[in-house]
């Protein structure tokens, strides 16, 4: 974790860039599209986002879902409360 201080605005920033990049590599998501916020608060996840074909189901069965969620939770709790909205929908 890195801590950055902006004396002018009186803010401290907690940065987890290296950790998040490591997580993305670990779950083979390093080429994902970057956005400033993970998902709009108006978006509601539904079953339509689930795997629809056998091929998608086989692929997703190999994804260590609980490990990915735990890693995101760590980043969320420590530095990114803004990602808690989307995480709470899983």
Image: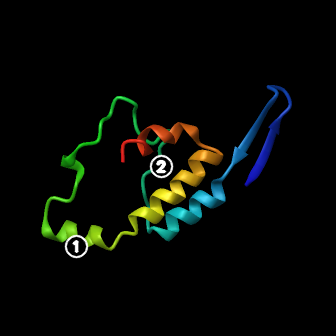
Separation of disc 2 and disc 1 at Cα?
26 Å
Task: Write down the quadrant of residue 31 in the picture.
Answer: bottom left
Task: Write down the quadrant of residue 23 in the picture.
Answer: bottom right
- List the residue tagged with mark 2: 34
Residue 48 in percent (x, y) is at 18, 47
54 relative position to 10: left or right: left
Quadrant position of the N terminus in the picture: bottom right
For residue 36, say whether it is visible. no
36 relative position to 46: left or right: right
Residue 42 in percent (x, y) is at 34, 29
- Which residue is situated farthest in the top direction here? 9
Residue 88 in percent (x, y) is at 42, 42
Q: Residue at x 66, y 53 (%)?
A: 16
Q: Earlier in the sequence, mark 2 or mark 1?
A: 2
Residue 13 in percent (x, y) is at 73, 40
Nearer to the camera, 12 or 65: 65
Task: Write down the quadrant of residue 8 in the picture.
Answer: top right
Nearer to the camera, 26 or 8: 26
46 relative position to 4: left or right: left
Q: Secondary structure at mark 1?
A: helix
25 relative position to 52: left or right: right
Q: Residue at x 13, y 64 (%)?
A: 53
Q: Secondary structure at mark 2?
A: loop
Nearer to the camera, 56 or 85: 85
User: Is 83 above or below relative to 60?
Assistant: above
User: Closer to us: mark 2 or mark 1?
Assistant: 1
- List the residue tagged with mark 1: 58
For residue 34, say whether it is visible. yes
């Amino acid at each position: 974790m890195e801590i950055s201080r902006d004396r002018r605005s009186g803010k401290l920033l907690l940065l987890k860039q290296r950790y998040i990049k490591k997580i993305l590599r670990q779950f083979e998501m390093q080429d994902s599209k970057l956005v400033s916020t993970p998902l709009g608060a108006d978006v509601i996840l539904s079953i339509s986002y689930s795997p629809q074909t056998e091929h998608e189901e086989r692929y997703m069965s190999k994804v260590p879902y609980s490990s990915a969620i735990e890693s995101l939770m760590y980043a969320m709790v420590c530095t990114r409360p803004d990602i808690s909205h989307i995480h709470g929908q899983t």
